[in-house]
Image: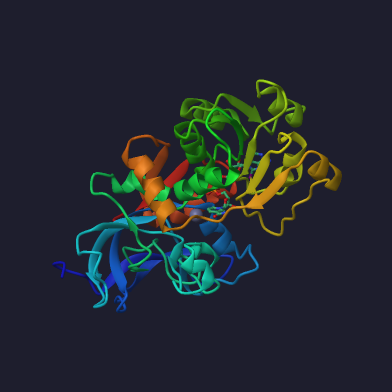
């Protein structure tokens, strides 16, 4: 057992859908037989956390709710069935907190498709607190050489874009358009794309995000807020003018989901990742058929994808910018996020 586990802790609690978050003291939970208690040190703030607070999706959250699913910390207690996670291990609380491990999806390691998942910061309390519970089978294993603050955004943003790039089928040397490239997922997508030998065409709005995308390694930056002809510009950014082999849709607005089929290359793949509220996908059937366009979704990743995404980070291949603020400032981060003013990721420090 770790030296001291307090009875109470600081947390950010959503008391009603729509928000805001309340910074207050709540009890520390005890892990069940197959669970670990993690002293969360840092947690990235994902746009999903804002969707959860606002009630954007057709899936209700638990209320009251402690959000957060990019929590990096240290195991301080474990249930009696847990054998392969030790007290003192560095682990991550990710979106998929637990799954049944026995349905036909879990059996094939498609855990994110489990019909009875536990979702951190959504259906179970997540990482915007100092002590969070995770199912031992699902906590991400974090090597001790990784900085806990820098690795935290990998636990959702990094994992998700790494998986989406794999799902896109794009091969080294090919072009991938990243829509929403200046956000949390996008900034990491540029880095993973580069590490995987892909050329990134970054699309987002504003000069600050443009500068960041170029610094992260995007060959081209297209500003959707000023572009006169985005479709033309995306195609022109590919050597033969036929458009990118893949498109990662990470934006939190519906427009780009309708537009991607206009610039994706024939036989190319559009991967939907962003989850704007009440949004629908639309593409012309004619183009989809005669240009053999693939349109698919990608949803986080499994435990193996998690280990791989973290290993890219451990090897020093993934360096995306993040800003650290206190957990007490979470509402301010949500306000900036809502206004589209965050370039990269914010990480909250649970000690402040
Ligand atoms: O597993 C999944 N599929 C998964 C995992 C994690 C997150 C999905 N998500 C979802 C989130 O719920 C959210 O809907 O991905 C979306 C992006 O999350 P994020 O990266 O954490 O959000 P952000 O940091 O706010 O970045 C969004 C970016 O989109 C840009 C914004 O400027 C911002 O930089 N953007 C928008 I809004 N409209 C755009 C447009 N028309 C656009 N960029 C280009 N074109
Ligand atoms: Zn997330």
Residue 343 in view:
no
- Residue at image position (51%, 58%) is 49
Whether residue 221 sits left or right of residue 225 in the image: it is left
- Residue at image position (51%, 74%) is 103
Q: Residue furthest left?
A: 3
Name the colouring of the figure.
rainbow
Q: Residue furthest top?
A: 239
Whether residue 78 sits left or right of residue 267 in the image: it is left
Total residue callouts: 0
The quadrant of the picture occupied by the C terminus is bottom left
**Residue 179 rendering spot, x and y as whole percentages:** 62, 39
Residue closer to the observer: 197 or 253: 197
Residue 125 in view:
yes
- Residue at image position (41%, 58%) is 303
The quadrant of the picture occupied by the N terminus is bottom left
Residue closer to the observer: 103 or 251: 103
Is residue 260 positioned above or below 51 on the image? above
Residue closer to the observer: 109 or 32: 109
Is residue 3 positioned above or below 269 on the image? below
Is residue 272 positioned above or below 39 on the image? above
**Residue 215 rendering spot, x and y as whole percentages:** 47, 26
**Residue 280 rendering spot, x and y as whole percentages:** 74, 55
Q: Residue furthest right?
A: 286
**Residue 160 rendering spot, x and y as whole percentages:** 50, 50
- Residue at image position (71%, 38%) is 267
Find residue 120 and report its image quarter. Answer: bottom left
Whether residue 216 sits left or right of residue 239 in the image: it is left
């Amino acid at each position: 057992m770790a030296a001291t586990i307090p009875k109470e802790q600081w947390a950010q609690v959503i008391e009603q859908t729509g928000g805001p978050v309340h910074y207050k003291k709540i009890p520390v939970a005890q892990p069940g037989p197959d669970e670990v208690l993690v002293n969360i040190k840092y947690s990235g703030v994902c746009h999903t956390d804002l969707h959860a607070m606002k009630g954007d999706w057709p899936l209700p959250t638990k209320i009251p709710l402690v959000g957060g699913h990019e929590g990096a910390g240290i195991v301080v207690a474990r249930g009696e069935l847990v054998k392969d996670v030790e007290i003192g291990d560095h682990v991550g609380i990710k979106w998929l907190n637990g799954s049944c491990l026995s349905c036909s999806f879990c059996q094939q390691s498609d855990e994110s498709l489990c019909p009875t998942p536990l979702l951190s910061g959504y259906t179970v309390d997540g990482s915007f607190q100092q002590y969070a519970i995770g199912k031992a089978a699902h906590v991400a294993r974090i090597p001790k050489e990784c900085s806990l603050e820098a690795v935290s955004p990998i636990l959702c943003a990094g994992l998700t874009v790494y998986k989406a790039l794999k799902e896109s089928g794009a091969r080294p040397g090919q072009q991938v358009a990243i829509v929403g490239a200046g956000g949390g997922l996008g900034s990491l997508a540029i880095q993973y794309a580069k590490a995987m030998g892909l050329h990134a065409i970054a699309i987002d709005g504003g000069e600050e995000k443009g500068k960041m995308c170029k610094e992260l390694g995007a060959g081209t930056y297209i500003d959707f807020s000023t572009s006169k002809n985005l479709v033309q510009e995306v195609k022109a950014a590919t050597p033969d003018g036929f458009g990118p082999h893949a498109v990662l849709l990470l934006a939190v607005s519906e427009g780009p989901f309708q537009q991607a089929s206009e610039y994706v290359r024939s036989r190319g793949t559009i991967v939907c990742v962003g989850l704007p509220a009440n949004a629908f996908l639309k593409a012309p059937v004619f183009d989809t058929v005669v240009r053999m366009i693939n349109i698919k979704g990608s949803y986080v990743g499994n435990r193996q994808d998690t280990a791989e995404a973290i290993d890219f980070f451990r090897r020093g291949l993934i360096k995306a910018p993040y800003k650290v603020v206190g957990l007490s400032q979470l509402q301010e981060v949500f306000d900036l996020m809502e206004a589209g003013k965050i370039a990269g990721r914010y990480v909250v420090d649970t000690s402040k």
